[in-house]
Image: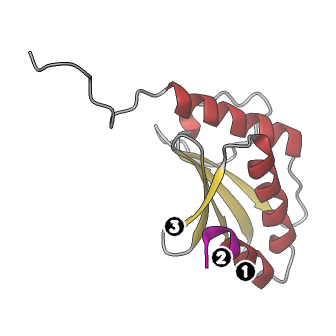
Amino acid sequence: MNPTEQIDAYIASLIDWRGPMLAKVRRAFVTADAGVTEHWKYLGSPVWEHHGPIAVGNAHKDKVKLTFSHGASLDDPDQLFNNGNGKVWKAIDIHEGEDIDEAALKALIQRAIAFNQAKPNRKTKKAGPPS
């Protein structure tokens, strides 16, 4: 299966509130920018990328967790982040009965994409003769 099919199957396997919630946040990722790609990594987790990783989505026993790879570097005026005090990542934990503002999430995703695009590409070597 390709990553999109794996994510489809993962969401379908979540027969409680977590399935529809993960489907909702997935829709925010794939509609935030046409360049967002879906991947299946880290022993079975949906991952969204655009010029690098944006976030990993997981359904835990009591929540849906979105871990943003560079969340600590992103402005969060809507205060979506509610987990993570690290220097790099931050997360959004969504519990049963809670909702998420899809427009605010899309805006956060777009800021993550802009952050990724602004990072220097470490894989690119300078052109020209050696000095």
Helix, strand or loop for disc 2: helix
Q: Which residue is mark 3?
A: 41
Q: Quadrant of residue 73?
A: top right
Circle number at residue 9: 1
Q: Is residue 59 positioned above or below 107 on the image?
A: below
Question: Between tags 2 and 3, which lies in front?
Answer: 2
Q: Is residue 15 above or below residue 92?
A: below
- Main secondary structure type of the part rendered in magenta: helix
Q: Is residue 87 left or right of residue 11?
A: left
Which of the marked residues, 1 or 3, is nearer the chain's N terminus? 1
Residue neighbourhood size for the residue with mark 3, other residues' Cα within 10 Å, grouped as few (<14), some (14–19), many (≥20): few
| Disc 1 from disc 3: Cα separation | 14 Å
What's under tag 2, amino acid-wise?
Gln
Q: Position of residue 24 (x, y in %)?
A: 85, 59
Mark 2 vs 3, N-terminal side: 2
Report if the CB atoms under discs 2 and 1 are less than 8 Å apart: yes
Taking the image as drawn, is residue 73 in sight? no
User: Which dot marks residue 70?
Assistant: none
Residue name at image x 62 percent, y 35 percent: 113
In magenta, the rendered stretch is 1-6
Quarter of the C terminus within the rendering: top left
How far from the left and from the top, in percent, is residue 107? 78, 34
